Amino acid sequence: MSTQTIAICVLLISFVIMIFLRFPIAYAVALSSLLCLLVQGLPLTTICQQMVKGISSFSLMAVPFFITMGCLMGSGGISEKLIALANACVGWMTGGMAMVNIVASYFFGGISGSASADTASLGSILIPMMVDQGYDDDFSTAVTITSSCEGLLVPPSHNMVIYAMSAGGVSVGSLFLAGYVPGALLAVSLMVGSFIISKKRKYPKGEKFSIKNLGKQFVVSIWALAAVVIVVVGVVGGWFTATESAAIAVIYSLIVSVFIYKGLDWKGVWHVLEQCVDTLSIVLILISTSSIFGYCLTTLHVPVLAAKAIIGLTDNPIILALLLDLILLVLGCIMDMAPIILIATPILLPIATSIGIDPIQFGIMMVLNCGIGLLTPPVGAVLFIGSAVGKVKMERVVKATLPFYLCMIVVLLLLTFIPEISLFLPRMIGGYTG
């Protein structure tokens, strides 16, 4: 057995073993890479070099600002405003509060960009509210966690920035535009599922639709929604880079949260910044250690070997596309989102492009696949958060989520086989020619 083969086995097997032993993902990535380098006889200074190289990226500078923006807006009294706006839009329907939950997640996701933040913030308000109105607690929690994945698709999503960095040369602005229609499609599919269940269980309707109330709530919420406009219009219009627009959005979010909605005082701002540092440290550690892992994969030619192995199974592009989705779904069950994007993109993107999947389209597919992974045991972070916020046993939440898994899989298949769902807006507005 050659040294290359031994090094590949050590890298991948040690990584899988540590994942199943529930090592923190950053440690699993770093230690498996360390063992791989030792087997190859490479200098350990390579670790420091690759870690620094991994976080020395201009596009990565936008991530801290997007995280800070999401934390400020999420803690600044935005949730209540967006829930009221969603209620004015869809609260009149059968299962009205479930519909409000889903639409509010679409609005809030465009601000936080985080499924975990969405579940924690909106869930703490909406789950008790739904239960008080007669909804089952497991159904309320299931709606909350599945709708939170809309926030991963709706810009500004820092995970899209991480994908753009990993894919190399992919436009962040085009990725942002590409997420709107898939996010809306996911919302509609979840609303259809909720409507069917609500009809069957006779869940209540809300108040009658009022155009006057809708206009009033829109005016109140416009300050929050404008943050998304600043980012997306600024990047797509070429006025700002993603980093510049994110920095401007942070200042705007601070003004709105402190002076307009008055949901934060200056003491609260410092507390929010502490949360941002905690979140950012986790993200940067993952990116830096994943850079070492990616270096090992590249030097050992694992992406090429993996591509040959997968393509060797079949030359049918439909089956290959389904295999890509299956691989990402399985990875989502055992890994968190950022590491999957960082590790799997260099391996799977060349396969995707070889069968005609556009890099932008594949980015949206990957984000949704990873989002579904956040809802699946054993590592589903959003599943755990939803269970804790709703005070419902995880087994009951998983069972209640099964119909919504089906809704999400249907959307995933549509995104996989109908490119225009993802590429329509980037081509029409962003001038994307891919």
Image (cartoon, rainbow, N blue to C red):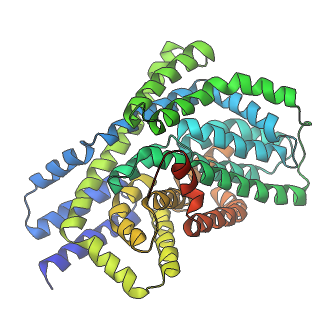
Quadrant that contains the N terminus: bottom left
Q: Is residue 387 visible?
A: no
Q: Nearer the viewer, residue 206 or 275?
A: 206
- Asked which quadrant contains residue 402, the reply is bottom right
Q: How many marks?
A: 0
Left or right relative to 382: residue 65: left
Residue sitting at x 44%, y 20%: 270
256 relative to 201 in the view: left or right: left
Query: In the displayed structure, would residue 179 be above or below residue 379?
Result: above
Q: Position of residue 364 (x, y in %)?
A: 51, 57
Side of 282 where 262 appears, left or right: right
* Quadrant of the rendered image containing residue 116: top right
Look at the image and tell me in which quarter the C terminus lies.
Answer: bottom left
Q: Is residue 191 left or right of residue 2?
A: right
Residue 232 seen from this side: yes
**Residue 368 on image: x %, y %:** 54, 58
What's the residue at 26%, 60% (across, down)? 294
Residue 22: x, y in percent? 40, 60
* The one of 245 and 339 positioned closer to us in this rendering: 245
Pick the front one: 313 or 38? 313
Examine the rendered structure and indicate whether residue 250 appears above or below residue 399: above
> Image point 49% across, 15% down: which residue?
267
- What is the x, y in percent for residue 136? 80, 51
Vertical order, 183 against 326 (above or below): above
